[in-house]
Amino acid sequence: MHTAKRVNQLPPYLFLALDQLVQKKRAEGHDIINLGIGDPDMPSAPAAVGALKRTVEDAITHRYPESLGSRRFRQAVADRYRDRFNVHLDRDSQVVALIGSKEGLAHLTWAYAEPGDLVLVPDPAYPVYAAQAEFAGATVYRLPLTQENHFLPNLAALDPAILSQAKLLWVNYPNNPTGAVAPRAFYEEAVSICRQYDILLCSDLAYADIGFEGYRPESVLSIPGADEVAIEFYSLSKSFNMTGWRVAAAVGRRSAVHALGQVKSHLDSGPFTVVQEAAVAVLQEDPDSFIRGLNTIYEKRRNLAVREIRAMGLLGEIPQSTFYLWFRTPSGMSSGQAASFFIEKADVALTPGSAYGAQGEGWLRLSLTVPFVTLDDALARMRQALLRHD
């Protein structure tokens, strides 16, 4: 019995392959420090844990949740956008709950993309954007992100013929994997182009609350008129150390939120009500206080990594957001060779940039999601491995 062709066309999922390699090395007796996967190492926000303990005993929460999300959760998201971004959303028509952003990214693509359509995807990028477009039978058109252009796509240089065929444009700032941030002018240009060519602008705001030295990421929906052409994905995963809870929301353009909700109604029943109540508690109980503490920790780790990677002669740019460093491979090594070198010679797992697209070749991504002492150890191992290599 054969699987569908679409399954065979999908590449191995990047982080699954990396995790399998790490587990193999550990089984062989190696003390591997994994800096490859962006999964926060610190506990979830206490408000979430407390709310879960309170609500899980109530049997009413054990039943099917509302497919589009509870009104309390959707209102809490709308309130967060009002307070954080000065963006005013209608709870009932502009917010839909997600079982994590990844699920929403996939289902939105299925709602819009079909054979013959182009989906504009940055390169390098989180692999899910391209994989889901291909899964839906659409054609992926890659937009190079280069250091010379501050890892922003050059939208003005796009051929009108390409824009005329495009159905979706994906943007992700603060950016994974590069750590780049987008100025307001970039969002203004993206909104203008998407309005002109009737393209749905899809903003993945996974790192909405991570920022250093006073930097605070913006929402594309803060641009006037953006809610007519844009849908944005806001997740609690990175902001509140809740990756395993699987709770997020898609907000913005009413017809896009409705279409996503339609697809989801045939595929899932929404996040577990207890998890939604935990999310409500987090969003209502002084979320910025928790975020400030989190950013202080990540900034300290970032500064350590910047200093050490710079001493190795590999640093690209110092990130203002995310918990990643995006840096050049040692001279003469491809991304894959460099990743293999560090795991074999330093027992440190990094992510090869080429896993995020052709433009990621020659780069590595390091995640700051380990304790300071562990990160210091990993960087020392990398430095010593390079000295021995030289």
Image (tube, helix red, strand yellow):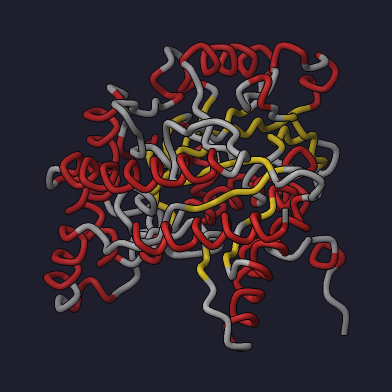
The vertical placement of 28 against 231, above or below, is below
Judged left or right of residue 285, residue 16 is: right
Q: Is residue 362 visible?
A: yes
Q: Is residue 271 visible?
A: no
- Count every numbered label the image shows and give the total: 0
Question: Which quadrant would residue 310 be assigned to in this image?
Answer: top right
Judged left or right of residue 290, residue 318 is: right
Q: Measured from the top left, where is residue 259 in percent x and y?
A: 55, 42
Residue drawn at x 78%, y 61% as measured from the top left: 11
The vertical placement of 166 against 348, above or below, is above
Q: Measured from the top left, where is residue 293 in percent x and y?
A: 21, 46
Q: Measured from the top left, where is residue 315 in percent x and y?
A: 58, 37
Residue drawn at x 52%, y 56% as measured from the top left: 264
Residue drawn at x 52%, y 66% as measured from the top left: 34
Foreground: 152 or 98? 152
Question: Which quadrant would residue 357 be assigned to in this image?
Answer: top right
The vertical placement of 282 against 43, above or below, is above
Q: Measured from the top left, where is residue 294 in percent x and y?
A: 27, 47
Foreground: 59 or 36? 36
Q: Quadrant of the N terminus?
A: bottom right
Judged left or right of residue 86, residue 318 is: right
Residue drawn at x 39%, y 58% as measured from the top left: 40
